[in-house]
Amino acid sequence: QLQLVESGGGLVQPGGSLRLSCVGSGVALKNSAISWFRQAPGGERKPVSCITADGGNTAYADSVKGRFAISRDNAKNTAFLQMATLKPDDTAVYYCATDNRVDLRGCNIWQHWKDYSVRGQGTQVTVSS
């Protein structure tokens, strides 16, 4: 069974940091781009970041540029989202997703949740004092 499992969420104060992990089970992530999305309470699911299979190219939403960093360790079948300088507006459930579609590999058209066939269940991030 193809599965992604996120972890690392929690409660953090404004200005703090968290590192999210996304582990693949039953699916080899090394040949596919991986993306992160988030959904705030009452809001739509929005793209956060994407990384290509070899880690050579990344993309970020404007709202997180300079604060978040995406990375991956293909040997561990895992992707990461390092989040720093967190703000209350970053409060959301964070999801990772992947798909082996060729057109998604370059992180050029990565922003649409509906394009991903393998998705995690999410991890809650709450930024509050």
Image (spheres, rainbow, N blue to C red):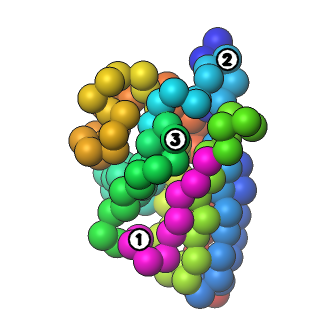
Q: CA distance from mark 3 to mark 1?
A: 22 Å
- Quadrant of residue 6 in the image? top right
The residue pinned by badge 3 equals 54
Secondary element at image label 3: loop
When the figure is inspected, residue 9 is found, relative to residue 87, above or below; the finding is above
**Nearer-N-terminus badge (3/2):** 2
Q: CA distance from mark 3 to mark 2?
A: 19 Å
Q: Is residue 71 magenta?
A: yes
Q: CA distance from mark 1 to mark 2?
A: 30 Å
- Quadrant of residue 76 in the image? top right
Residue 121 seen in the current view: yes
**Nearer-N-terminus badge (1/2):** 2
Residue found 55% across the figure and 83% down from its top: 85
The residue pinned by badge 1 equals 64
The residue pinned by badge 2 equals 26
Tell me which amino acid carries mark 2. Answer: Gly
Residue found 67% across the figure and 44% down from its top: 73
CB under 8 Å between callouts 3 and 1? no
Residue 6 seen in the current view: no
Tell me which amino acid carries mark 3. Answer: Asp
Q: Looking at the picture, how far across and down is residue 33, in whole percent?
A: 45, 37
Q: Is residue 82 magenta?
A: no
**Nearer-N-terminus badge (3/1):** 3
Q: In the depicted view, which residue is nearer to us: 11 or 83?
A: 83
Q: Looking at the picture, how far across and down is residue 91, in whole percent?
A: 51, 68
What are the residue bounds of the magenta stretch?
Answer: 64-72
When the figure is inspected, residue 104 is found, relative to residue 45, above or below; the finding is above
